[in-house]
Image (cartoon, rainbow, N blue to C red):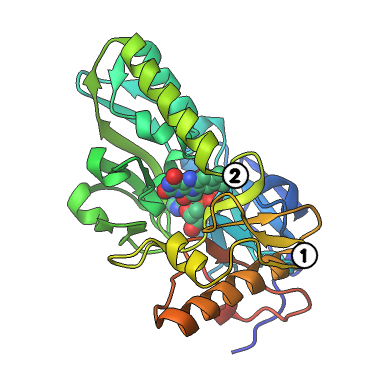
Amino acid sequence: MMLPDFRDLELYRLPDVKGSYKKHVVMAPYTWFRVGGATTVFRPQDHEDLGQFLLKNSEEVPVTIIGAASNILIRDGGIPGVVIKLGKNFASITFESNSVRIGAALPNGIAARLALKQGYSGLEFLSGIPGTIGGGLRMNAGAHGKEIKDILIEAEVIDSTGNFKVLSLEEMRMSYRHCGVPQDYIFLSGLFKTGKDEPSDIQKRLDEIEARRLESQPITERTGGSTFKNPKGYKAWELIEAAGCRGVSIGGAMVSEKHCNFLVNTGNANATDLENLGNLVQKKVKDSTGIELEWEIKLLGVHKDSKFNRENVKL
Ligand SMILES: Cc1cc2nc3c(=O)[nH]c(=O)nc-3n(C[C@H](O)[C@H](O)[C@H](O)COP(=O)(O)OP(=O)(O)OC[C@H]3O[C@@H](n4cnc5c(N)ncnc54)[C@H](O)[C@@H]3O)c2cc1C
């Protein structure tokens, strides 16, 4: 069904809120890829404000949540509806005796460093994943043999009609780069298991992680991290390499020379270049190996000049 173009939200009355709306925000500067069209950004003031917004928002206005935008590719036509960005009132951190409760908006790296200061161990692997705790819960982010599900006890969420819930680890139904709760749930915080250790030993582990990342990933470039999930029994980068895709480019988008499961914006790429390049890599791997790579990066929004169609909106 073709619906009216929601990029023009003047047509729709958004609920009154305590936080702020900003319309026509071009998203490119806020994403790791530095690409992406415009949207309306809602920054809720606090949990209650977010709840009231979700309760009162018209069902016809789609809602998308983003974190640090380190694992998303926002298309050039922007994101129809409202994009929610959580701010400092969602970024608390509270240390308990054997655990830590962390707000969804807190960046992983800051969480790991604050834990280090308190002598809490177990969050080190998060230090090199450049997202927020909320994005990490949705993606079941992981590195160096550990993922969020290995340390998660429970997560606090809010559903699309503003109901707050606490979900146990089992209810999160997490697996490799996947969380099984409905797409429209917004994570507010996670409670994570921790140990205790000497800060100097934790620091040593953080330094090792930093060094390994610098060596193996193009972390100083405009990228979105791993483009594709590793298929069972394979490494995506090996399949991409074998298909001859290392260094291949379309427009300003290139398959990283350093880590060929990373796409990079070499300067003037748009989202279409990056998406087309990903699709090309997928096709070449499929043609040469028969294996279908699955996008790990989330493709959000609509192509330039496309009319909004609810089926186009992939959260
Ligand atoms: C250089 C680089 C290296 C990376 N290395 C790794 C790595 O080693 N391991 C790894 O797992 N990932 C890695 N990534 C990918 C990325 O950092 C992770 O997936 C991260 O967890 C995404 O968090 P984010 O806050 O940036 O989420 P976004 O990219 O903003 O969003 C990702 C998804 O999470 C959803 N989301 C965000 N916040 C919330 C919330 N509060 N509630 C519900 N859903 C939410 C979004 O809707 C979207 O579907 C890397 C990325 C880069 C750029």
Residue drawn at the location 67% of the way across and 78% of the way down: 308
* Whole-percent x, y for residue 76 in the image: 74, 66
Element under disc 1: helix
Q: With respect to residue 265, does 183 lie above or below?
A: below
Element under disc 2: loop
User: Marks 1 and 2: in contact by CB < 8 Å?
Assistant: no
Q: Is residue 65 visible?
A: yes
* Whole-percent x, y for residue 154 in the image: 25, 42
Residue at the spot of label 1 = 10
Residue type at tag 2: Pro
**Within 10 Å of the Cα at label 1, are there few (<14), some (14-19), or many (20+) other Cα atoms?**
few
Q: With respect to residue 247, does 292 lie above or below?
A: below
Ligand 1 closer than 8 Å to label 2 CB: yes
Residue drawn at the location 29% of the way across and 22% of the way down: 121
Work out whether mark 2 precedes mark 1 in sequence or the reverse, and give the earlier one.
1
For the N terminus, the image quarter is bottom right
Quadrant of the rendered image containing residue 100: top left
CA gap between label 2 and label 1 equals 40 Å
Residue at the bottom extreme?
1
Residue type at tag 1: Glu
Quadrant of the rendered image containing residue 14: bottom right
Quadrant of the rendered image containing residue 113: top left
Residue drawn at the location 37% of the way across and 42% of the way down: 143
Left-right relation of 191 to 269: left
Q: Of circles 2 and 1, which is in front? A: 2
Residue at the spot of label 2 = 218
Residue drawn at the location 55% of the way across and 41% of the way down: 86
* Whole-percent x, y for residue 146 in the image: 29, 41
